[in-house]
Every structure is written in C-alpha cells, then in structure tokens.
Amino acid sequence: MKHARINEVRVFPPFVSGGEYEASLFCSNVEAAVRVALDEKGYIRPELPSGLCDFSDLFTYSGEWKNGGHETCINNIGDLDVFERASQLLARLGLVEFKENLDRFTSFCRDNAERIDEIYELEGEAAGRQLFYEFDDRFWEIKKKSPDLDVILQNWLVDQPWIVLDTNVPKWPVQYYRETIEVHPLKQARKEAVRRERVAENLGTNLTFWQRVRDSLGGST
C-alpha cells in the first residue's frame, strides 16, 4: 500500500489589511485543514507537513487564551503535550518570552494537578481561576510589546513550502477540505484500533474497581 500523506495545504491568501482579526481568520482556515485531516479523514500527525501540527497546537493555545486566559487553556485543552509542542514552535519562532511563560504554566499544571483539583472542589471556580492569573498577567505584558501571535503565525505560514496560496479556494474552506482531502486508506483500521484500546481501558478500570471492592469485603483474589 502506498503510504498516504498530505504534502500541501491550499488556502485563500491573507487579507491585505493584515490586522489581528484577518490573521486569525487566515490561521483558522489552515487549522480547518488540520482538523479535517486528523479528525475526519483518518490521518495522523506524522502524515501532515512538518510543522503544520505544531502550528495547530500553538494556534489552539493562543485561541483558548483569548477566550478566557490560561484557566480556559487547561480546562478546554487539558493535554499538556499540546502546550509542550506549542512551546517548541515558539522556540523556533524566536519568541523566547512567550515560550518561557508557557513552559512555566505547563510545569505548574503538571506539578500541581491534585492541588488544582482540590482548590476547584473545595474553594470554587473563582479561587481556581486565581491560580492562573500570574500567567495571564505575564502574557499581557509580553503581548503589549510584541505583535499578536496570530499575526506572527500567519507570517510564518505563508513562508512555509507546503502552504499554497490559491484564490480559487473558498474564503470559508471547511467544506472544500472535506471534498478535496482524500480519506486515508487506514482510517477504518485506525478507528477500530482506537475502539479496541478504549474497550481494554474500560475493562481494566472495571476490573480494578471490582478487585478493590472484593478486597474491602475480605474476598480472595
């Protein structure tokens, strides 16, 4: 079987004004191609152009921060690997201060996971939200003296060899990507593998639970 992969992303060119909103729209269109490929067509990260998924991670982080700060980032994303990959792209872009702030936030979430959960449970959302204020404040300080992250990402994207600017691509391209990105030949097999893995995880969880029940009742193994 020929190894299937995506080698380019065709996207409508950036708008001339080049402001923050326009940059966010351009990045959103590229992100749409990533989501269709990974979530709908059965591709995995290594089968997309080098750097494209790192872009997706950083754009996701930036978007969630705009939606509600670092509390929203950890609640809506959750996966610390996303932040670590986003940090790697920040390093390649030379955005040292953004990277350092994100790294501190990631380490804080990893090292204090139980404490964070306890504060939300015992003291409420307001107290939990305050845990992340220092990272939000630092982000704002950096942002004031730096171009918007989406503008930086847009400028980086248009320099990538796998981005093809094409005025024939719709300005709202989700359906276009659904029609033009081919289904990966291993999509069904990969979907079934994920299903089996989840079944195995659930079975293991249930067995552990019932073993604890037996042990608490003095049952033998």
Image: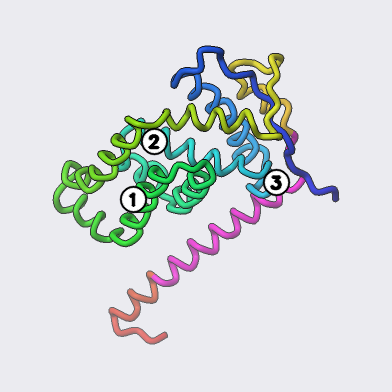
Disc 1 marks a residue whose amino acid type is Phe
Badge 1 crowding class, 10 Å Cα cut-off, few under 14, some 14 to 19, many 20 or more, is: many
Disc 3 marks a residue whose amino acid type is Glu
- Establish if 53 lies above or below 178: below
- Establish if 201 lies above or below 139: below
Q: Which mark is residue 64?
A: 2
How far apart are the two marked residues, 3 and 1, measured between alpha carbons?
A: 29 Å
Report which quarter residue 206 is drawn in. bottom left
Q: Mark 2 falls on what kind of element?
A: helix
Name the residue at 36% across, 36% down.
65
Residue that mark 3 sits on: 47
For this rendering, which residue is in front, 44 or 86? Answer: 86
Q: Which mark is residue 105?
A: 1
Disc 2 marks a residue whose amino acid type is Glu
Query: Nearer the N terminus, badge 2 or badge 3?
Result: 3
Instruction: Check contact, mark 2 vs mark 3: CB within 8 A.
Output: no
Query: Nearer the N terminus, badge 3 or badge 1?
Result: 3
Residue 79, image x, y percentages: 44, 51
Badge 2 crowding class, 10 Å Cα cut-off, few under 14, some 14 to 19, many 20 or more, is: some
Horizontal arrangement in the rendering, residue 60 relative to residue 101 (left or right):
right
Residue 217, image x, y percentages: 29, 80
Residues in magenta? 182-208
Q: Mark 1 falls on what kind of element?
A: helix
Name the residue at 54% across, 45% down.
92
Query: Nearer the N terminus, badge 2 or badge 1?
Result: 2
How far apart are the two marked residues, 2 and 3, measured between alpha carbons?
A: 26 Å
